Image: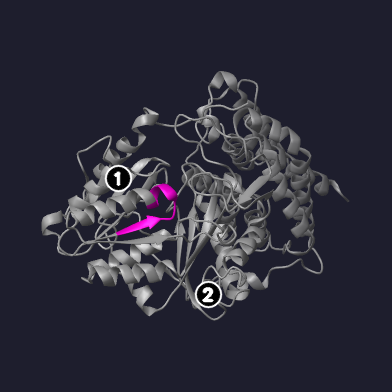
Amino acid sequence: MLSHGKKLINSPDAVVTEFIEGLVETYPGLQYLDGFPEVKVVLRSDASGPTYNKVAVISGGGSGHEPTHAGFVGEGMLTAAICGDVFASPTVDAILAGIRAVTGPMGCLLIIKNYTGDRLNFGLAAEQAKSEGYMVETVIVGDDCALPPRRGIAGRRGLAGTIFVHKVAGAAAEAGLSLAAVAAEATHASEMIGTMGVALSVCTLPGQVTSDRLGPGKMELGLGIHGEPGAVVADLQPVDIVVSHVLNQILSPDTKYVPITRGDRVAVMINGLGGTPNMELMIACRSIVAKLQLEHGLAIDRVYTGSFMTSLDMAGFSISLMKTEQSVLQRLDATTKAPAWPVGADGNHISPKVPIPLPSSCLKESHELLGRPPKLSQHGLVLEAAIEAAAREIINLKDSLNEWDSKAGDGDCGSTMYKGATAILEDLKTNYPLNSAAETVNEIGNSIRRAMGGTSGIIYNILCKAAYSSLKTDNQTVITARQWAEALESAISAVSKYGGASAGYRTMLDSLIPACSVLKERLDGGVDPVTAFVLSSEAALAGAEATKKMQALAGRASYILVENLISVPDPGAMAAASWYRAAALAVKDRSQDP
């Protein structure tokens, strides 16, 4: 069923004028002509027609492609942008008003995207302006490579590659060139550009229903920036495959849309269509650069990635390639104050990767200890049994932990802890120097860091590293019960310091803090270490159960009302109490072996 698209607007009829008002408030170097709603023209605040002594560069078209066109108004780029209604060419009167406002004795260049409405309206305005005595030249840009070569008068559509023409022309005008020279550079630039896009959705116009023309699991290659149909609808493919198809189409020797061949140098623009996350654009960029270099033999001079010419909220991207030479690069790199022009990246990286720093030499001794010893000492055997029991307990609790977490978080506590526990069991077979308790604790932290994501992984890694630091200071292979208690206390302090939680916050500390307290008390009272460990594990379980009545003060659960958490224990506290208890019972069992 079709429905109206959701928009944060006041009225569909006012979106363009209100956009312009917000734009000039954001960028003080921009102004607009006082002619709303018929005349919607954004211009440089320092450009006044009668006194402007450089060629004025003007472009425009339908709105809905922001930041194009108004976002590219500024010194070194456009002098004015003429804004039509959404996806509608601006009127002749609006274009004429823009020409009159900024054109001085050097004349003006109109950069027109190749759409029938734009060609007619800008063309008529140009002729009218000439009859009024203005010097006017026009350049029509058609960089679309999606459709077969034209058979009628329509020709290739103007797409995101037009922005390259804006930049080249604007820089040439700023350098003081004549109208003829600026027009010549713009024309040359337009002949060096090819663009093609892919969309995952069509756009929704303000006040209009959302079209379901492009169904689930489908993508459209060559879709126009106004939502007009493209070359083909296909099943959604991985971005590497999509990029290969688009680049092959742009660089096709059959169509000869762009004069780019192996060995040439190019600038690349990866343009989001309005609803594409920056992450996806960067993933596409990675693929595009690699394929241009390795498969097409092109050198990359500049890479521009972002949303430059959008189609409202359309999901997808377009790729524009421009053949470069030193004079073109000079124009692309020239300074501009246009707010939407990106900072270009030099494509000639020596290497984008640098090696991970190795541990300092002072850690050499500890690294020499890594790996399972050929023979385990009695303490090593006990430590192995405790680690294995703790990890298996967490694996068995996976579903319960997820269920508890679904009431108070995102429901993945068990899955996250499971990853850590399985990694520990795997590394336990060969990687842990079990005869050295301190180094084993450190390696457990490394296992967790590699396998566990999210906050839990970081917290447990901090727990292990802090305990390791405490145990390491004694520089002993055999660790006493008192030293284990002090290490646990240090670990709890570190987690509290960096995580911000303490007793009563409904976290894992609500099990570990009472466990540590009971362990120290029993050891101070002369209780044997194994019994003290078991008793402290009972305190850990009691502390975890007590979280059922606590208001969460940390993590996602802190946003949930306490009445919604009644009878639900904190999954982090239950996990900590469970592995602690399992380890204690394992130590007890080993101590009873003959």
Question: Circle 2 is placed at which residue position?
Answer: 260
Question: Circle 1 is placed at which residue position?
Answer: 92
**Outermost residue, right direction?**
594
Asked which colour scheme the image uses, the reply is one colour
Magenta range is: 110-119
Q: Position of residue 442 (x, y in %)?
A: 63, 59
Q: Pick the residue in front: 470 or 239.
A: 239
Is residue 68 shown to the viewer in this render? no
Is residue 204 shown to the viewer in this render? yes
Q: Quadrant of residue 366?
A: bottom right
Q: Badge 1: how crowded within 10 Å, few (<14), some, or many (20+)?
A: many
**Outermost residue, bottom direction?**
263
- Residue 272 colored in magenta in the image: no
- Residue 116 colored in magenta in the image: yes
SS type, badge 1: helix
Q: Quadrant of residue 532?
A: top right
Direction from residue 57 to residue 567 in the image, left or right: right
